[in-house]
Amino acid sequence: MIAFQSRAWKVVKPLMGRLFSQTPGRNSLIEVFQENGVRSVTLADTRTRNSLSLQMLRELQEAVSEEDPSLRCIILQAQGKVFSGGHNLKELTGREGRSHHQTVFNECTHLMLTLQRLPVPVVAKVNGVAAAAGCQLVASCDIAIASQGSSFSTPGANVGIFCSTPGIPLVRCVPRKVSAHMLLTGLSITAEEALRAGLVSKVVPEEELDSEVQKAVDAILHKSRSVIALGKKFMYKQMEMGIEDAYRFHIPKQEQVLPRVLQLVQITNVGIPQDTHAQLSTEDFP
């Protein structure tokens, strides 16, 4: 069972899976539904263009961080035609004060790093505008699948706030000239341009978006949970290294893990069994 009650979440609608929303007192800005190992987290604050307000950031952090051994994949999606318009600028005025601004940015950084450090893949399902910190959110996910009508931008300079933090994952996803063009001009790029640049993984017609995301999720579900966790951890770890250091880091770890995996593999056409995760740990790649 997923233990959302410990974080002040509750069931709001009976379904075959589980649908959660925050308890009364403050309306939740997201919806969370989990079924068959897949957790769908939906930004549901269309009134503010799904802005990454402090409340939204904290709710997203809770939703993606909730531990569940059956969890295999997380999908981030949004209601409406705006995936996210970025930070809520009403929270970044002089009246709110520098301390509040720092809290917002700290929470945002925490969420973006969490997405990378989670042991399960995070898939961004984008159908609309992803701007500023919304673009940052897409860039921070492991996989991003977008509809053809989606667009991506970092327009902060247009309103006097350079998109410094959105640029951090952006420049790690796309070539320098593309990121510089986005950050310095504030102009948006189309989904196809984002695909060519490497910001998104796939682009499909809007009517095929659900099926394309499901295809990716199904492929993940057919893999060993711990093999994916180990692989994701190593993938990001070695990206921080030079190529020679990456090979030196990888080979000893592979020598430690591979014999244990092979011991678990039955000599069949199935290959590595799904329950391999019970025998391995992400500690194999510290």
Image (cartoon, helix red, strand yellow):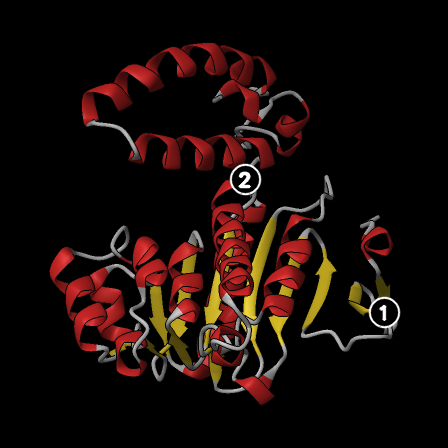
Residue 249 horizontal/vertical position (percent) = 33, 17
Residue occupying image coordinates x 58% and y 31%: 226
Circles 1 and 2 in contact, beta carbons < 8 Å: no
Residue 61, by quadrant, is bottom right
Tell which residue pokes out farthest to the left in this image.
177
Residue 34, by quadrant, is bottom right
Name the foreground residue: 250 vs 257.
250
Residue 119 horizontal/vertical position (percent) = 56, 39
Q: Which mark is residue 100?
A: none
* Kind of residue at badge 2: Lys
**Left or right of residue 110: residue 18:** right
Name the foreground residue: 162 vs 138.
162
Name the foreground residue: 10 vs 94.
94
Q: What secondary structure is marked by label 2? A: loop
Q: Give neighbour class at mark 2: few <14, some 14-19, many 20+ (Cα, 10 Å).
A: some
**Left or right of residue 156: residue 53:** right
What residue is pinned by disc 2?
223
The disc, 1 or 2, on the residue closer to the chain's N-terminal end is 1
Q: What secondary structure is marked by label 1? A: loop
Residue occupying image coordinates x 45% and y 79%: 85
Instruction: Identify whether 132 is placed above or below 227.
Output: below
**Left or right of residue 247: residue 60:** right
Residue occupying image coordinates x 45% and y 73%: 86
What residue is pinned by disc 1?
23
Instruction: Identify whether 158 is placed above or below 126.
Output: below
Residue occupying image coordinates x 48% and y 47%: 113
